[in-house]
Amino acid sequence: MKKTKNRWLIALSAIFIHLSIGSAYAYSVYKNPISEQLGWSGTQVSLAFTLAIVFLGLAAAIGGKYVEKYGPRKSATVSAILFSLGHLGSGFAVSIESLPLFLFMYGVVGGIGLGIGYISPVSTLVKWFPDRRGLATGMAVFGFGAGALITSPIAANLIVSINIQSTFYILGVVYLVLMMLGASYIARPEEGWAPKGFDAKQNAAGAKAKTDLSQLTANEAVKTKRFWLLWTMIFINVSSGIMIISVASPMAQDMVGMSAAAAATMVGLMGLLNGAGRIGWSSISDFIGRPAVFITYFSIQIAAFILIPMTTNAFLFQLLILLVLTCYGGGFAALPAFIGDLFGTKQLGAIHGYILTAWSLAGVVGPITVSYIRETTNSYNAAFYIFTGLLIVAFIVSLVMKADIKKIRQQNEAVTKKSLVS
C-alpha cells in the first residue's frame, strides 16, 4: 500500500520554493550598484523588476493549466531551472555590460520561473489542508515575503565583498538547490484523501459551512461574476501595497523626515510584516471567512491611506505603513483558499494563475502612478487620496462579493433540499 506523504513536509517544500522566488522583492539592493558600475539609469535597472512582475502574472495565467496537467513536481522543477537560469544569465549580462540581455534574463526568463514557481506549491497545499486552507497557503507565501528579508542583507554583503555578477551566480546556484529540494518532495494527495478526523470536524461544525460554492474549471470560472469581483479586489489590494513598497524609503524621508538609515530599517520591517501578515491574516480567514477578512483589509487600508498624508509623527507613520503591508501580504495568502471556497479545487492552480494577472497589472500601475504624482506635484499626498478612492471601490466590491456568495449558497441549499425531497 502506497505510503501517504507528510503534509507538513509538503508545506516545508513549498516554503523552500517560495523563499527562493521571494528574493525578487529584494531586487532594490541591486539597483544602485548596477547603476554605479555600468552607468545604466535607475529607470533602466528598475525595468527588469517590472518585467519580472509582468511575466510572473503571464506565466501564472498560462502555467496554471500546466500545473494541473503535469503536477506540482514537474512544474516546480521547471520553475527552479528558469529562475536559477535567470540569475545566472543576469550575472553574465552584467559581466559583458549588456542591458538587453539583463532585461531578458532577469525580467523574462526569471519572471517566467517566478510565476510558475509561485502557483506550483500553493494550489497543492490547498488540497493537503482542506481543514486549514488559509493557514496552509499562508505558510507558503510567508516564505515569499520572508525571502526578501533574508536575501536583502546577504546580497548586499556579497555585492560589496565580491562583485555583482558573482552575487547573481552564487544566489542562482543556491536557489536551484533549494527549489529542487522542494520540488523533489512536493506532490498532490491521492484523490479523495482527507486528514484524519476531518469528516468528523466537518459534521460537528456543520458541513454546509465548509462546502465549496462550486467545482468549476478555469474556463468556467472566468465566466462568473465572482471571478471578476475577486480579480478587482486583488488588483486594488496589490496596487495599494506595491505603490508604498516601490517608494517606501524616499517617501519616509520626505513625508516625516526620517533618516536614510531609519527608513532602511522601516523597509526591513515592511518585509517582516508582509510575511507575518501572510500567516496571520490567512489563519484568521479560516475562522471568520475569506469575504470578512477582505472587508477588514480594505477597512484598515482606507483609514490608513486617509491618515498617512496628515501624519507628521514618524512612529505613527511607520505603524500605518506596516499595517497596510500586513493587508498586502494577507491578500496574497488568503487568495488561494478563497479561490478554493468559490470554485473548488478541480483546477485551482489554473484559476489562481488567471487571477494573478491582476498582480502583473498592479505591479505596473502602482509604482508608475505614485512616481508620476511625486514628479508632477512634488508630493505623495495626491497618490494616497487616489488610492483611497480605489480602496473604497474595493470595499464596496467585497460587500457585493459577500452578498453574492450568500445568494449562491442559499440557491445551492434549495437545490439540495429539493433533491432530498424528491
Image (spheres, rainbow, N blue to C red):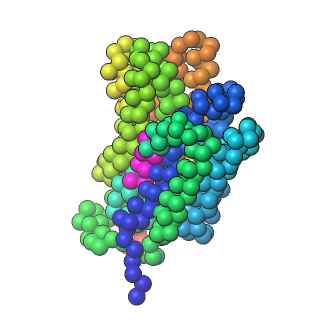
- Residue 117 rendering spot, x and y as whole percentages: 55, 56
- Residue 222 rendering spot, x and y as whole percentages: 60, 53
Q: Is residue 394 left or right of residue 326?
A: right
Q: Is residue 318 above or below residue 51?
A: above
The reply to whether residue 78 is in sight is yes
Q: Which of these two is toward me, 78 or 222?
A: 78
Q: Residue furthest left?
A: 204
The reply to whether residue 337 is in sight is no
Residue at 58 percent across and 64 percent down: it is 77
- Residue 228 rendering spot, x and y as whole percentages: 56, 45
Q: Is residue 8 above or below residue 110?
A: below
Q: Is residue 149 left or right of residue 109?
A: left
Residue at 41 percent across and 48 percent down: it is 142
Q: Which of these two is toward me, 294 or 53?
A: 53
The answer to whether residue 51 is magenta is: no
Q: Which of these two is toward me, 165 or 27?
A: 165
Residue at 70 percent across and 27 percent down: it is 39
Q: Is residue 214 left or right of residue 104?
A: left
Segment tinted magenta in the rendering: 139-149
- Residue 52 rendering spot, x and y as whole percentages: 63, 43
Q: Residue furthest front?
A: 161
Classify the position of the N terminus by image quarter: bottom left
Classify the position of the C terminus by image quarter: bottom left
Q: Which of these two is toward me, 365 or 182?
A: 182
Residue at 50 percent across and 52 percent down: it is 20
Question: Secondary structure of the magenta portion, mostly?
Answer: helix
The answer to whether residue 140 is magenta is: yes
Task: Using the rendered view, name the quadrant where residue 267 is placed.
Answer: top left
Task: Using the rendered view, name the quadrant where residue 295 is placed.
Answer: top left
